[in-house]
Image: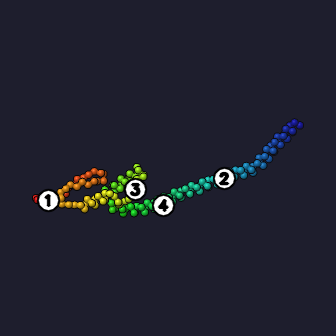
């Protein structure tokens, strides 16, 4: 009798284990499905955010390219009218802005050198006096006008 009682106990334990496994398989499968669904929703949200950031970057780049094109055409006309000395002076003023951001920004086409060159070219006299004019690099250059000989 002992062997039949032991066999019944083993049989009952196997049956109960099978019932537990079969009974809990539905809840485990649903839990796995919910975890997969939550993971998919999280990845979808992350993809949406990434796409929005990329579109914002592309939009900013498009605005920058358009603005650059508009400014380039407007600045090209002003730069063409400048002399090389004025261009160099303008570049030096822009470079000084990187060092001293609080300084006043230069405007293209207006420079102190343009006024100096206009006055020095207009004031030509027949007298033989040396004129000292200032260059853009703060050095002075002596200019002499030819004198009439034989008087």
**Residue sitting at the far top:** 2
At mark 3, the secondary structure is loop
Mark 2 or 3, nearer chain start: 2
Residue 24 is left or right of residue 53, and the answer is right
Percent from the top left, x then y, of residue 120? 25, 59
Q: Is residue 121 above or below residue 35?
A: below
Gap in angstroms between the C-alphas marked 2 and 3: 55 Å
Q: Are marks 1 and 2 in contact (CB under 8 Å)?
A: no
Q: Which residue is most to the right?
A: 1
Secondary structure category for the residue under label 4: helix
Q: Residues within 10 Å of mark 2 (few under 14, many from 20)?
A: few
Which numbered disc, 1 or 2, marks the residue closer to the eye? 1
**Can you tell which quarter of the image residue 115 is in?**
bottom left
Residue 64 % position (x, y): 46, 59
Q: Evaluate whether residue 128 shows in this view.
A: yes
Q: Position of residue 49 (x, y in %)?
A: 58, 55
**Distance of mark 1 from mark 3, alpha carbons?**
47 Å
Residue 99 placement, left or right of 29: left
Q: Which residue is disc 3 drawn over?
A: 105
> Considering only order in the chain, which callout, 3 or 1, is on the residue closer to the N terminus?
3
Q: CA distance from mark 4 to mark 1?
A: 64 Å
Disc 2 marks which residue?
Answer: 38
Q: Callout 4 environment at 10 Å: few (<14), some (14 to 19), or many (20+)?
A: few
Is label 1 in contact with label 3 (beta carbons under 8 Å)? no
Residue pushed farthest left?
150
Q: Residue 148: give its label.
A: 1
């Amino acid at each position: 009798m002992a062997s039949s009682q032991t066999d019944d106990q083993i049989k009952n334990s196997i049956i109960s284990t099978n019932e537990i496994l079969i009974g809990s398989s539905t809840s485990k499968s649903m839990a796995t499905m919910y975890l997969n669904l939550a993971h998919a929703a999280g990845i979808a949200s992350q993809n949406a955010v990434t796409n929005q950031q990329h579109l914002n970057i592309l939009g900013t780049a498009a605005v920058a390219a358009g603005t650059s094109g508009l400014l380039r055409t407007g600045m090209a006309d002003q730069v063409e009218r400048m002399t090389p000395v004025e261009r160099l002076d303008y570049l030096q003023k822009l470079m000084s802005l990187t060092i001293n951001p609080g300084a006043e920004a230069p405007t293209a086409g207006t420079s102190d050198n343009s006024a100096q060159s206009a006055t020095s070219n207009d004031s030509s006299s027949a007298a033989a006096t040396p004129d000292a004019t200032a260059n853009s690099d703060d050095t002075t250059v002596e200019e002499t006008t030819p004198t009439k000989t034989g008087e």
